[in-house]
Image (cartoon, rainbow, N blue to C red):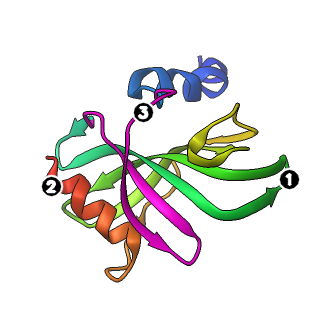
Amino acid sequence: MNGWVRKWGGALLLLVLGTSPAHADWVKVGSSDQGDFYLGSEESKKFGANIMIWVLRDHLGVRYGTHGAFMSSKDQIEVDCRQRRIRLIYSSDHPQAMGEGKFIHSMHGPMSWNDVDPRSTLNRIVNLACARR
């Protein structure tokens, strides 16, 4: 059974948590020297003090990864509203702005927890997400 969990656990997690809709409505929540940040407008899943959100990062210019060039990234993030920390659940890089085009690379988590810098755009996203609870 452990082999099955390792092989299919990530896919099952994505099915349980949901995936980003192709034509999601995005609300701009901030900008940085790296690009614009958007929060998915759809209902977020809640787990106690935690909430799952979708964030779109529209990069200022083309970025290059090992799998090719991309202009934007979509991230599913779990936010721990009590401890003010986040962890990445899923991320995909897209060749066009605003998450358009077939993804060229994806990562599946969950990754480790990270504290949020109170002066960052990410902190604004956490504040908005936790207000949805």
Mark nearest the camera among 1 and 3 is 3
Return the mark for residue 24.
3
Which residue type does callout 2 highlight?
Answer: Ala
Q: Give the vertical position of 36 relative to 48 (above or below).
A: below
* Residue closest to the far bottom: 119
Q: What residue is disc 1 on?
A: 66
Q: What's drawn in magenta, residue-wise?
A: 21-44
Q: Residues within 10 Å of mark 2 (few under 14, many from 20)?
A: few
Q: Residues within 10 Å of mark 3 (few under 14, many from 20)?
A: some
Which residue type does callout 1 highlight?
Answer: Thr
Check disc 3 and report its element: helix, strand or loop.
Answer: loop
Q: Residues within 10 Å of mark 1 (few under 14, many from 20)?
A: few
Q: What residue is disc 2 on?
A: 131
Looking at the picture, tell me which residue is in the foreground, 90 or 93. 93
Report whether 133 appears left or right of 25: left
Which residue sits at x=49%, y=58%? 112
Which residue sits at x=23%, y=63%? 127
Report whether 41 appears left or right of 32: left
Which residue sits at x=73%, y=41%? 105
Percent position (x, y) of residue 32?
Answer: 50, 75
Mark nearest the camera among 3 and 2 is 3
Check disc 1 and report its element: helix, strand or loop.
Answer: loop
How many numbered marks does the figure carry?
3
Mark 1 / mark 3, whichever is N-terminal: 3
